[in-house]
Amino acid sequence: MAPTADPFTHPALFYADEAGYLAGTVPFVEAGLAADEPVAVAVPGENLALLRKALGGDADRVRLLDMEQAGRNPGRIIPRVLRGFADAHPGRRVRIIGEPIWQGRSASEYPACAQHEALINHAFTGREVTILCPYDTSKLDEVVLADARVTHPLLIEDGVEWTSDAYAPDRVVAGYNLPLSRPPGARGLTYDADLLPDARSFALDQADRLGLPADRHDDVALAVSELTTNSVIHGGGTGTLRVWAEDGHVVCEVQDSGRLSDPLAGRRPAAPGQLGGRGLLLVNYLADLVRVHTVDTGTTIRCYFRMRT
């Protein structure tokens, strides 16, 4: 799939050290400011501090976000971070630096990150937006760098820009649509329309038993209510809820016979006055990670809630 003429631009910036990072990002920001384009930077905290210092007084003219907080769940980066900024400036070209992948992302998080990078290309088709995505070649695995060449139509390294001959973002979306393994001891409950309140209570009881802080119980209750209700309405009228602890998270999984055919489901901001269609979007906002596996015979949606913030 070759890049086509489109006002949307989505380059990957490969850098190996601080000097390379600043050489690729600071001129990008300054060019946007010089052109009176709104500019946002959403990168991990260490790089955010680096850029803030390098920009000096110009940093006050840029929307600065710590991606480790704003984009902890890759599923909310498009609606809350990228679209949130672009949609706030209608009729103007905007520039964004978005760095969703850094050393320390877990094996559970990475597939969602890669799918996010691929889906950006569909979410912004036709938009007057440039999103520059930095990748640290000194710290990230070669698989991550190879995926970046597939999810970005343009590549930049050492000041040189070229067209990626590997660009095929849908291949990454499909490639990471993998079955999700679960521990054999996960506790489960099968529910239907009459048992929706029981499913919510079951999730809360399990989350409390597993040690999730009380201030996150509402997040679990709302996310599980949205997912189980979607099962009843769109997933064949019934489903199975499972809850367990994994790597410092409480994990809630809903499995049903519905087919999730839209890869951008849950990644579009709700339109003003929109009725319905907010369930998975809300789950993305509430959870620290959301993973999805969908096939013709059913869908599994798994959401993670960190034990400690």
Image: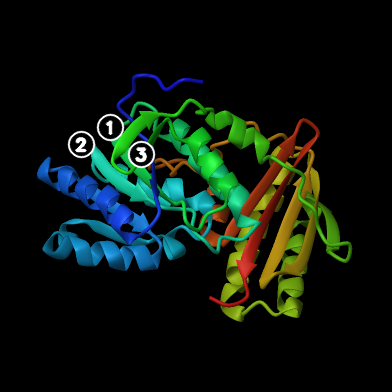
- Comparing 215 with 109, the one in front is 109
- Image quadrant in which you'd find residue 28: top left
N-term-proximal mark, 3 vs 2? 2
- Comparing 279 with 36, the one in front is 36
Residue 44 in sight from this viewpoint: yes
**Above or below: residue 160 compared with residue 28:** above
Q: Is residue 173 left or right of residue 131?
A: right
Residue located beneath label 2 in the image: 92
N-term-proximal mark, 2 vs 1? 2
**x and y percentages locating residue 228 in the rendered image:** 71, 52
Residue 128 is tagged as 1
- How crowded pointer 1 is (Cα within 10 Å; few <14, some 14-19, many 20+) is rated as some
What is the tally of numbered marks visible in this picture?
3
Asked if disc 3 and disc 2 are in contact, CB closer than 8 Å, the reply is no
Asked if disc 2 and disc 1 are in contact, CB closer than 8 Å, the reply is yes
Q: Amino acid at mark 3?
A: Ile
**x and y percentages locating residue 45 in the rendered image:** 38, 67
N-term-proximal mark, 1 vs 3? 1
Residue located beneath label 3 in the image: 156
Of helix, strand and loop, which one carries label 2?
Answer: loop
